[in-house]
Image (tube, rainbow, N blue to C red):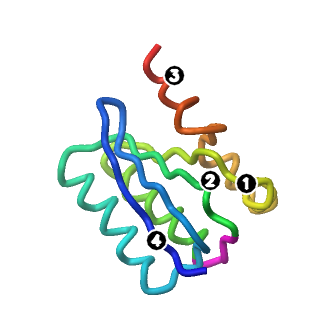
Amino acid sequence: MKLTYTTSKDDLATYLFIKGDLIGDETGPQLVEVVSDAIEDGVKTFVVDLSEVRYISSSGIGLLITMLTKMRNVGGEVYLAAPSEHVKKLLIITKLNNIFTVYDSVETFRKEKAS
C-alpha cells in the first residue's frame, strides 16, 4: 500500500500522520524533509502517528531513526503514537521502544504534555 501522509501543528508539537506501508520508498526523503522543515521553523517536538501504518521495513525503521537523530541534534524529540500491534511488536524486537517514547494515541500525548 502506497504511503501517504499529512501534517498538523498545535502549541505542543508538529504531527505527522502516516498512512500505508513505511518502506522507505520515494516518500521516505519527503518525510525526512518534513522533519527538516519543522526544525527550520524552530519545532522541538515532533509526533509521528502510526495508527494507519500496516507494515514497516528496515528502511522504514531507518527513516524513523533519521528523523529522531535530526531532532535530537537540535535538542528536540520525536515521539511515536498509536502503533498497531504488529508495529508495536516490531518496535520491541528492534528495541526501538527503548529509544522512542511511544504513546497509545496522539490524544494521550496531548493530555500528558498539556498537564
Hey, what amino acid is under mark 4? Thr
User: Residue 40's x, y, as percent?
Assistant: 19, 54
Q: Is residue 78 left or right of residue 70?
A: right
Residue 92 against residue 77 in the figure, above or below: below
According to the image, label 1 marks what residue? 84
User: Residue 57's x, y, as percent?
Assistant: 66, 77
According to the image, label 4 marks what residue? 4
According to the image, label 2 marks what residue? 51
User: Residue 6's x, y, as percent?
Assistant: 39, 59
Residue name at image x 38 percent, y 40 percent: 45
- Asked if the residue under mark 1 is in contact with the one under mark 2, i.e. CB atoms within 8 Å, the reply is yes
Hey, what amino acid is under mark 1? Ser
The residue sitting at the bottom extreme is: 26
Question: Is 57 included in the stretch rendered in magenta?
Answer: yes
Hey, what amino acid is under mark 3? Lys
Disc with the residue nearer the chain's start (4 vs 1): 4
Q: Which numbered tag is attached to residue 111?
A: 3
**Which segment did they paint magenta?**
55-59
Kindly report the distance in space between the C-alpha atoms of the residues bearing marks 2 and 3.
Answer: 18 Å
